[in-house]
Image: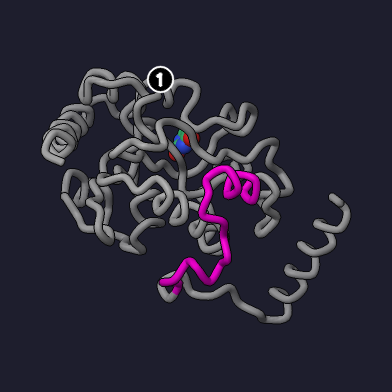
Amino acid sequence: MHHIKALELKRLYQLRCVGVKYSDSRRVVNINNYNLPTSLQKLEEVVNDCHLCELSKSRIKSVFGEGNINSPIMFIGEAPGGSEDECGRPFVGRTGSLLAKIIETMLGCSREDVYITNVIKCRPPKNRVPTQSEVVSCRPYMLRQIEAINPKILVALGSSSYQFLTDDNTPISKIRGVVLEFGDKILIPTFHPSYLLRNPSAKKDAFLDFKKIKSYLENI
Ligand code: URA
């Protein structure tokens, strides 16, 4: 089975080498074209078995997402790192602890009460930024996840997450805390917790963003 998938992947690379291009993500409007299951459990199975991009070759585990599937709020990071790749869960390790602490202190709930995922479901080697074709391959999974969970508020953690969600290159320092529309939901970008670990002075801005998030949560 694994051998057949490796061959299929190789054929896709060959097509790309002779000039076949992935579709432009900005034109991907209807995720129904991907024929993805609507049930989260089935979708997770598809993700665990996905070989659409080369991250599938180096991953240990894919990281689908976890938390309360009835939550009105969903946190979306960039991609799994080393610890997440090992255990198959999003935001573990130091970055995850900080995210959990912020959720507890600012929103008054635990990480299990909200839903947490990433745009990209497999770890990029050495934690490099995912390529555009990886984003195009993986983003439909996240869009389907958003549809299935149907939260009212999406929180994009960091510039890559914001960019992959919206195709907008505005730096996170300019767009953070701004309340945006994302279909029938609202999207609030804020700093990535790993950025906050490296730049503790940015925490005060993140706290303002979370105050705003809290007030939106209270009013839905
Ligand atoms: N950084 C992310 O963006 N996601 C994780 O799951 C972990 C670290």
Is-magenta flag for residue 42?
yes
Q: Could you say which is closer to the camera, residue 44 or residue 53?
A: 44
Report if residue 67 is visible in the image. yes
- State the image coordinates of residue 74 (x, y, percent, origin top left): 34, 40
Rendered image coloring scheme:
one colour
- State the image coordinates of residue 194 (x, y, percent, origin top left): 39, 31
Per the rendered image, the range of residues in magenta is 28-47
Report if residue 205 is visible in the image. no
Residue type for callout 1: Ser
State the predominant SS element of the stretch in magenta.
helix
Q: Could you say which is closer to the camera, residue 139 or residue 132?
A: 139
- State the image coordinates of residue 184 (x, y, percent, origin top left): 25, 58
Q: What residue lies at 86% left-to-right and 51% top-to-bottom?
A: 1
Residue pointed to by mark 1: 97
Q: What residue lies at 50% left-to-right and 68% top-to-bottom?
A: 32
Is-magenta flag for residue 152?
no
Label 1: few (<14), some (14–19) or many (≥20) C-alpha neighbours in 10 Å: some
Ligand 1 is within 8 Å of the C-beta of the residue at disc 1: no
Left or right: where does residue 101 sit relative to residue 48?
left
- State the image coordinates of residue 213 (x, y, percent, origin top left): 18, 37
Q: What residue lies at 40% left-to-right and 20% top-to-bottom?
A: 97
Left or right: where does residue 136 sit relative to residue 70?
right
Report the label total: 1
Left or right: where does residue 41 sit relative to residue 150?
right
Dot 1 falls on a residue whose secondary structure is helix
